Amino acid sequence: MATVITQELVAVLRSQFRVKWDGIHGVRHWSRVRLYGLRLARETGARTDVVEWFAFLHDAAREAEGFDHGHGTRAVALARDLRGPLLPIDDTGFDLLSYAMTHHSDGFQEGDATVRTCWDADRLDLPRVGIEPDPERLCTEPAQRSEIIEWARKRAQSR
């Protein structure tokens, strides 16, 4: 499976990113979210293209490392601007991506398998900030399994 994340896309994201590139919401976090999401997608049936774009876009419009109200909505606006050669996504995929990004910090658990996979991929990286994922707050069966949580925890803490 080929990645949808291109060097050109990463360069554009880096050029407009307002917080620390290698900070807690930066490129290493995005890369781990992508890894977790692709692993979960093998079981959830999520659209892997949406999972990958979510991983690299959901925090790309942050203005602060801490609480940043509206960063998901700003990520949707960024994705809308990138649609085309850098983000070749169909309308259905864009709707899923937009919903996942808009609500990724809201604690929701219900929705399409792709959206839930995106949210779980992000939540599995919480150990990077000292928070253990609560299986009851994860949305998909694979993410709730202790071996997946432990696998992700080790990666998140190795930063």
Image (cartoon, grey):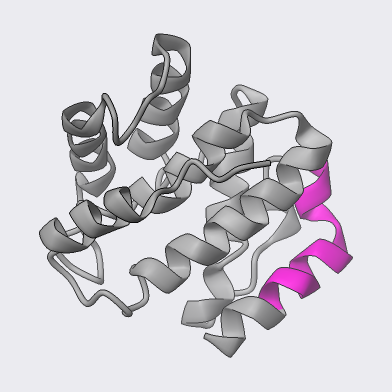
Q: Position of residue 31 (x, y in %)?
A: 50, 63
Q: Nearer the viewer, residue 48 or 149?
A: 48
Task: Name the residue rendered at 49%, 41% in the picture.
Answer: 4
Q: How many marks?
A: 0
Q: Position of residue 37 (x, y in %)?
A: 63, 49
Q: Is residue 35 left or right of residue 33?
A: right
Task: Name the residue rendered at 44%, 41% in the picture.
Answer: 53
Q: Position of residue 18 (x, y in %)?
A: 12, 65
Outermost residue on the top side: it is 91
Task: Name the residue rendered at 24%, 63% in the picture.
Answer: 67
78 versus 124 height, above or below: above
74 versus 30 height, above or below: above
Quadrant of the rendered image containing residue 21: bottom left
- Region in magenta: 141-153
Q: Is residue 27 left or right of residue 148?
A: left
Outermost residue on the bottom side: it is 158
Q: Which of the image's four quarters has the N terminus?
A: top right
Quadrant of the rendered image containing residue 10: bottom left
Task: Name the residue rendered at 37%, 76% in the picture.
Answer: 24
The main secondary structure of the magenta stretch is helix
45 versus 66 height, above or below: above
